Image: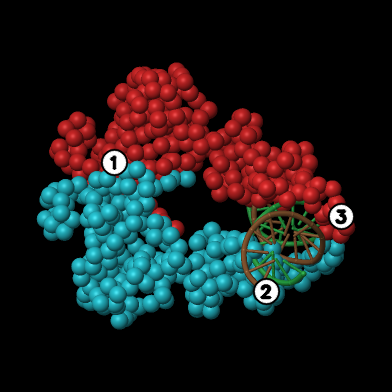
Chain colours: A red, B cyan, C green, D brown
Amino acid sequence: MNSNPASTANPTGPAGPGEAVPAAAAPATSPTFSPLYQQIKGLITQSLESGEWKPGEIIPSEVELAARFKVSQGTVRKAIDELAADNLLVRRQGKGTFVATHNEDRAQFRFLRLLADDGAEHPHVSRLLECRRLRASADIARQLDLKPADPVVLIKRLLQFDGEITVLDEIWLPGLVFRGLTLERLSEYKGPLYAMFETEFGTRMIRASEKIRAVAADPTVAGLLQVPPGFPLLSVERVSYTYGDRPVEVRRGWYVTTGYYYQNDLS
Amino acid sequence: MNSNPASTANPTGPAGPGEAVPAAAAPATSPTFSPLYQQIKGLITQSLESGEWKPGEIIPSEVELAARFKVSQGTVRKAIDELAADNLLVRRQGKGTFVATHNEDRAQFRFLRLLADDGAEHPHVSRLLECRRLRASADIARQLDLKPADPVVLIKRLLQFDGEITVLDEIWLPGLVFRGLTLERLSEYKGPLYAMFETEFGTRMIRASEKIRAVAADPTVAGLLQVPPGFPLLSVERVSYTYGDRPVEVRRGWYVTTGYYYQNDLS
DNA sequence: TAGTGGTCTAGACCACGTG
DNA sequence: ACGTGGTCTAGACCACTAT
């Protein structure tokens, strides 16, 4: 970041059109240069993270934010542009800019990209198997950025597409963040898991990274998915991140890809 | 598109600061409104497609393009911004804007996202198996937007990572576009396939869409990949597109995912 | 020193959604 | 009619790269 406190003023005082600025004081040219709009982006992100504006809510208009940060509308505009590109904000012309949410969006297919062979997005229902609290293994601890033996929550569930059992998920969450998460509370909640995490625990999943392999079903997994042992399954290892790129979920999924496929677009 | 010929003038004549424009003539408000920068984007894309600027070359500076299209620099800037986001152009501060290329980029991992278990990008070498010309099946014809029995080229090859046979590819290309493509010419070429398609046949792959499944190796595939029949493989069906979203390649890949995984980022 | 892209500003007008 | 985001302009200055 630059040395300038972007929350109160702009740096060396860029000139507006017509003004003839001496450009004397402050030689600038900091070795670590960060544009103003990046700093504004950071300040907006802070407000999102602190909960000043909650998911689904509208944020102040561009002119209001420009006044608050003492910069031009164009600068907050560029900051919001990038935040919208990162799926943190959603712009709606004529209405305003809103905090993105996993709730009423049809955003569930952003993270579960399983389509039927005909390309349709079939709805799915979850069948919870268990929800236990235990101590993190070395592996899980490392991926969640915890210490080994720190408390974690383990959820197991099946996903059915059109009644067919298609996905088995094992989900690890940091125990401290998800205090009070029980199987009962899980089963009461209607809607996507990420929507629940967002509204009930204030933790919003921003991005995720997946490692995909083809594996043979071991007897346990095969039994749950009702396929023969050795059946080829898609193994999907996901780590999800919130604000500040902090990992908050490890998810291991096994997908039956007969009649369904994992959709990915390269660009 | 708007009614305005963006190549020669700007629409209703947006006012500069200070000017007081009557805003009389041309009621505008076309039901199909397309912003100026979108039209500029289209014109630039045309120049790319027509080969006015070839992959790797520099394009005219923003001020030059602004003069040519009779718009402000800011408008061509926004057009170039989007083209750069689409990976059609590459901006380099202080130097200029260049046409993206599959040649000297390390862009091969943009389309083949197979990483070693430790996360490293291992280099791979190709072993060509065959290159035949034949008539398109109904299925391939549909995906390539051809008529059944139209001529196509079929390439089969193996990919080795660190000497290990890891990928088997079957690649279908439209015969008319890839006239003169032979096994000999393929084997002479050094570098990625997409780089060759670009320089030798003037066809640049812009984006691709993949369908991923887990399958059991059939005897033929198993033999080529040196795994036992029934071994779980990642099946990757890709369709690649050039300018104008025209499909120009169908690729069916079988990946051995022991020691390697398919990397995907959701955001 | 000159040229390129990158940032920032200020102001005008347009399209959209609501009263 | 009003407020919001969306487009467009013109001009100044900054940062990077080459000569």
- The residue beneath circle 3 is A21
Which element is circle 3 on? loop
How many marks the image carries: the answer is 3
Answer yes or no: is residue A63 visible.
Answer: yes
Please report, as a chain letter, where disc 1 is located: A
Tell me the mark number nearer the camera, choosing from 3 and 2: 3
Distance of label 3 from label 2 (alpha carbons): 28 Å
Q: Name which residue lies at 16% across and 47% down.
A: B231
Q: Which residue is mark 2?
A: B64
Q: Chain of mark 2?
A: B
Q: Is residue A67 above or below residue A200?
A: below
- C5 vs A76: above or below: below
Q: Position of residue A258 (x, y in %)?
A: 23, 47
Mark pair 1, 2: CA separation: 51 Å
Which of the numbered marks, if any, corresponds to residue A235? 1
Q: Amino acid at mark 3?
A: Val
Tell me if mark 2 has few (under 14), some (14-19) or many (20+) residues whose alpha carbon lies within 10 angstroms of its own. few
Q: Position of residue B29 (x, y in %)?
A: 68, 64
* Real-space Cα separation, disc 1 to disc 3, in angstroms: 61 Å
Q: Position of residue B224 (x, y in %)?
A: 16, 59
Name the amino acid type tagged 2: Glu
Q: Estimate how packed mark 3 is, as few (under 14), some (14 to 19) or many (20 or more) residues with alpha carbons within 10 Å.
A: few
Q: Are marks 1 and 3 in contact (CB under 8 Å)?
A: no
Q: Are marks 1 and 2 on the same chain?
A: no
Which is more toward the observer, A175 or B75? Answer: A175
Residue A125's image quarter?
Answer: top left
A93 left or right, relative to B172: right
Q: Tell me which residue sits at (18%, 35%) in the image.
A: A218
Which residue lies at the image location 40% right of the left edge and 19% below the top edge?
A: A151
Is there CB contact under 8 Å for labels 1 and 2?
A: no
Which amino acid does the dot numbered 1 rest on?
Ser
